Image (cartoon, rainbow, N blue to C red):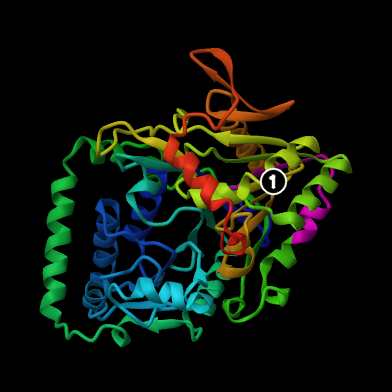
């Protein structure tokens, strides 16, 4: 039950298949509106299944608004334009590049000051009553359905008054001059018959998949049953939504009034005992590194989880991060790097695509004094600070903090991570086959990765990471 009108309900989506189930269910039960905002929306298997659910919602009268960043949309304008022919679907592209084909890659280089500024927000809202906010985009790697790599990620499923704020944040972006209707970008004429073809293809793909063992197990998952029975065990608590003003992308890094980082900073300044930080792309910079060291010196135990070189999907970020880790360790800060063989993320249900897969951290969250939890889209890096827009929720709940901390401790166990130590030289401590072992160079990373990081660490582009 809600204790008072100021509280909202929160449920952690830590399992990748639960994260898919929640989004599919929200599209399926929508009655009036669907507001969908993402940095990346892949046209892969999970993306097409969700597209089927979204198109089905529009067919039954649900008004759908989709806002997606342009960074990964090369060659997809026409399909999006076809979908937008539906009377109940509107699609807008955030900060679209002028060149819509392969010349866009050149534009990213020669017009980086504008083209490099991106919308990194991730929200999924049904009927202005239920929302998902967190680290996941739309794509197989976020739902444990890719051969090579699957992300360890975290979202919040939320309901209550906080959802009105999430919708307001969506409206701010939707109505900004950065958001362009897809019809204004594609020059190729489309007709409604093409929408019928898309509907037919998505329906066929869905009906082929629904009889697989994977989808049968999804139907039996704990979260599916909780949604059907309306028995999701929400934790009710007070919370605040923080998000960047879209005009952040039009301002210099010094103009911080429209950055949510300025508003959220007091929560971290007031941390007394413990600060747990998960950030897959961790490049604190000299200012951030100094803040962490001073906070540690004041008596707050800081523990950081990020990716190992073997686990990261962006080695350029690792080149920026490695410059700071020894100083942080010398200050007494604990640093852990996720292993690509981390076992704890394995899905509760059978994966659609079988085979070995590596783990990579993608969750962005923080736990303050086992009382406050922040979950959202922002990393601790220069890009999130100055070049991307971000969103996140700060929840005041000891129960949710304890649940999130439990995930953090499991991820930082020696079974799943390397603990970095300074024993005269940098050392990676871990557990393999129930035995503790030490590495004295980047573990499980191949020569090309190490060479790439070395070369990238020589280049002056930290502000872009």
Give the answer, above or below, for where 444 lies relative to 391.
above
Label 1 residue SS: loop
Question: In which quadrant will I find the C terminus?
Answer: bottom right
Q: Position of residue 239 (x, y in %)?
A: 67, 58
428 inside magenta stretch? no
Q: Is residue 248 left or right of residue 142?
A: right
Q: How many marks?
A: 1
Give the answer, above or below, for where 79 lies relative to 185.
above
Q: Residue at x 44, y 81 (%)?
A: 179
Residue 280 in sight in this render: no
Residue 203 in sight in this render: yes
Q: Residues within 10 Å of mark 1 (few under 14, many from 20)?
A: some
Give the answer, above or below, for where 387 lies relative to 304.
below
Q: Position of residue 205 (x, y in %)?
A: 15, 53
Q: Which residues are magenta?
A: 265-280
Q: Residue at x 25, y 39 (%)?
A: 352
Give residue 408's quadrant in the image. top right
Q: Position of residue 310 (x, y in %)?
A: 47, 36
Q: Is residue 414 left or right of residue 347?
A: right
Residue annotated with mark 1: 324
Give residue 151's quadrant in the image. top left
Quick one: 420 or 131, which is closer to the camera? 420
Q: Residue at x 57, y 60 (%)?
A: 160
Give residue 63's quadrant in the image. bottom left
Give the answer, above or below, for where 267 lies relative to 415.
below
Q: Residue at x 59, y 15 (%)?
A: 436
């Amino acid at each position: 039950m809600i204790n008072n009108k100021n509280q909202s309900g929160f449920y952690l989506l830590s399992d990748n298949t639960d994260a898919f189930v929640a989004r599919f269910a929200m599209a399926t039960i929508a009655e009036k509106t669907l507001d969908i905002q993402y940095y990346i929306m892949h046209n892969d298997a999970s993306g097409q299944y969700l597209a089927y659910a979204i198109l089905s919602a529009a067919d039954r009268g649900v008004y759908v608004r989709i806002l997606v960043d342009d960074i990964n949309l090369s060659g997809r304008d026409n399909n999006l334009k076809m979908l937008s022919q539906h009377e109940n679907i509107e699609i807008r592209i955030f900060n679209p590049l002028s060149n819509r084909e392969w010349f866009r890659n050149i534009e990213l280089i020669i017009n980086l000051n504008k083209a490099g500024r991106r919308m990194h927000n991730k929200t999924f809202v049904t009927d202005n009553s239920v929302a998902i906010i967190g680290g996941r985009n739309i794509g197989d790697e976020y739902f444990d359905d890719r051969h090579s790599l699957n992300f360890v990620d975290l979202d919040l499923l939320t309901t209550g008054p906080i959802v009105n704020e999430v919708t307001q944040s969506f409206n701010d972006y939707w109505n900004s001059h950065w958001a362009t209707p897809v019809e204004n970008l594609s020059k190729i004429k489309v007709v409604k018959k093409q929408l019928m073809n898309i509907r037919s293809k998505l329906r066929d793909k869905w009906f082929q998949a629904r009889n697989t063992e994977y989808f049968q197990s999804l139907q039996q998952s704990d979260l599916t049953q909780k949604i059907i029975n309306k028995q999701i065990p929400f934790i009710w608590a007070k919370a605040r939504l923080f998000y960047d003003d879209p005009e952040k992308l039009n301002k210099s890094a010094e103009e911080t009034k429209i950055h949510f980082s300025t508003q959220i900073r007091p929560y971290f300044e007031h941390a007394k005992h413990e600060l747990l930080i998960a950030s897959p792309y961790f490049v604190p910079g000299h200012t951030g590194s100094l803040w962490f060291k001073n906070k540690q010196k004041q008596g707050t135990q800081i523990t950081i989880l990020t990716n190992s070189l073997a686990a990261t999907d962006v080695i350029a970020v690792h080149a920026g991060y490695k410059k700071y880790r020894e100083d942080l360790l010398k200050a007494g800060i604990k640093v852990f790097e996720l292993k690509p063989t981390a076992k704890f993320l394995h899905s509760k249900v059978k994966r659609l695509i079988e085979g070995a897969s590596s783990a990579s951290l993608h969750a962005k969250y923080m736990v303050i004094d086992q009382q406050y939890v922040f979950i959202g889209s922002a990393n601790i890096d220069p890009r999130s600070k100055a070049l991307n827009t971000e969103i996140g929720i700060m929840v005041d709940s000891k129960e949710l903090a304890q649940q999130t901390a439990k995930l953090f401790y499991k991820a930082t166990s020696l079974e799943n991570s390397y603990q970095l130590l300074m024993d005269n030289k940098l050392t990676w401590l871990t557990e393999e086959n129930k035995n503790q072992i030490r590495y004295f160079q980047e573990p499980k990373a191949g020569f090309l990765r190490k060479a790439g990081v070395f070369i990238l660490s020589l280049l002056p582009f930290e502000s872009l990471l």
